[in-house]
Amino acid sequence: MIQRKQSLFLFIAALLNALLFIVPFYRWHEAGDTVWHELRLNTFFPAFLVAIVITLLPLVAIFMFRKRKQQMAMCGVSLLSITTFLSMMLAKVGNLVPANAIDGTYWIGAALPVVAFIFIILAMAGIRKDDKLVKSMDRLR
């Protein structure tokens, strides 16, 4: 029973972060132009590297189930990486989109890291709960 929910939460977070490579982060339409422009990861190399990291960290944390302290630390690093990714992409949107852009919207790719952030927090809560359970069982011996 121990580590089942946390592993699922971490896998879902990794899957959501992997979807960032497919879906756009921001879409805009310039005045007088009929083409939609998209901001994707492949157009911004530093964010591409950070996206690889935020996809791999939850997967690595799944296999650290015997070392709960290190697993918590790995989840913390993952949360920090997601925050870094979001700040990089928001800064890129602010610098990239021209002044004559109309009808610009954040796309699904902007919400995926936020949802992954929530799943990692849920996994951390479950890991902490398992750690307390193991410590209480050790006291009974």
Image: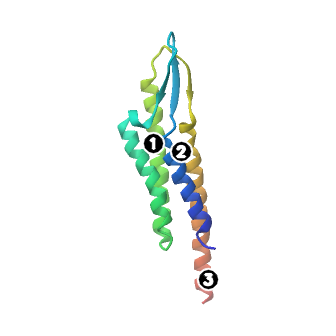
Q: Is residue 1 left or right of residue 50?
A: right
Q: Residue at x 61, y 58 (%)?
A: 122
Q: Amino acid at mark 2?
A: Pro
Which residue is label 3 attached to?
137
Which mark is nearer the camera, 2 or 3?
A: 2
Q: Secondary structure under badge 3?
A: helix
Which residue is label 1 attached to?
85
Residue 79: x, y in percent? 50, 52
Residue 135: x, y in percent? 58, 78
Q: Amino acid at mark 3?
A: Met
**Cβ–Cβ under 8 Å for marks 2 and 3:** no
Q: Amino acid at mark 1?
A: Phe
Which residue is label 2 attached to?
113
- 1 or 2: tag closer to the N-terminus: 1
For the residues labelled 2 and 3, the Cα–Cα distance comes to 36 Å
Q: Is residue 81 left or right of residue 134?
A: left
- 1 or 3: tag closer to the N-terminus: 1
Q: Secondary structure under badge 2?
A: helix
User: Where does the C terminus fall, quadrant-wise?
Assistant: bottom right
Mark 3, Cα crowd under 10 Å, few <14 / some 14-19 / many 20+, is few
